[in-house]
Image (cartoon, rainbow, N blue to C red):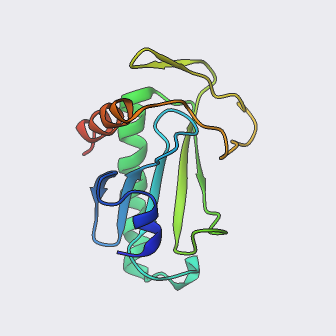
């Protein structure tokens, strides 16, 4: 595992691991169900990934979209590949909502809908909320 996976809480935040990719619950929720999709390699450029890794990406994104749709019925989904601070290939997966969502008695507003998300925006959640969110998403996987 690379440092980027570890920074985003691997293995505690792990939702699903594949041969080349892992899906993690993003420690800071931008919107309800924000994830990290991280490649296992040490590649720092998307073009450096193997064709097998790229092929698996289509399976992983389908699983992400199915699980998040089942859990939260998002309106859109954003995949942001920034790699400015954390250099290994990864995406911030941000489900987007045109209406407020309620999870564990917390009302969550996508303040930037329909524009680009602000990754510095944080949904206030304590560790018990994050564990419940992790369990819910895992329950809808596959």
Residue at image point 56% right, 76% down:
46
Whether 102 is drawn above or below 82: the answer is above
Does 138 sit left or right of 3 as displayed? left
Q: Residue furthest top?
A: 105
Percent x, y of residue 117: 69, 42
Quick one: quadrant of the C terminus? top left
Percent x, y of residue 113: 70, 30
Does 41 sit left or right of 15 as displayed? right
Percent x, y of residue 89: 52, 72
State the count of labels. 0
Residue at image point 38% right, 19% down:
104
Percent x, y of residue 4: 47, 69
Residue at image point 57% right, 81% down:
47
Front in this rendered view, residue 126 or 32: 126
Q: Residue furthest front?
A: 126
Whether 22 is drawn above or below 111: the answer is below
Whether 125 is drawn above or below 16: the answer is above
Quick one: quadrant of the N terminus? bottom left
Residue at image point 35% right, 39% down:
67
Whether 111 is drawn above or below 18: the answer is above
């Amino acid at each position: 595992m690379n440092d980027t996976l570890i920074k985003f809480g691997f293995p505690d935040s792990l939702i699903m691991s594949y041969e080349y990719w892992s899906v993690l619950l993003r420690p800071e929720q931008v919107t309800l169900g924000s994830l990290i999709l991280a490649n296992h390699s040490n590649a720092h450029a998307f073009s450096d990934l193997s064709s097998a890794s790229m092929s698996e990406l289509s399976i992983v994104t389908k699983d992400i979209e199915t699980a998040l749709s089942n859990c939260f019925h998002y309106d859109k989904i954003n995949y942001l590949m920034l790699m400015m601070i954390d250099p290994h290939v990864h995406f911030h997966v941000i489900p987007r909502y045109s209406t407020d969502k309620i999870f564990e008695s917390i009302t969550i507003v996508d303040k930037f809908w329909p524009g680009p998300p602000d990754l510095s925006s944080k949904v206030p959640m304590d560790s018990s909320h994050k564990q419940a969110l992790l369990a819910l998403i895992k329950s809808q996987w596959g």
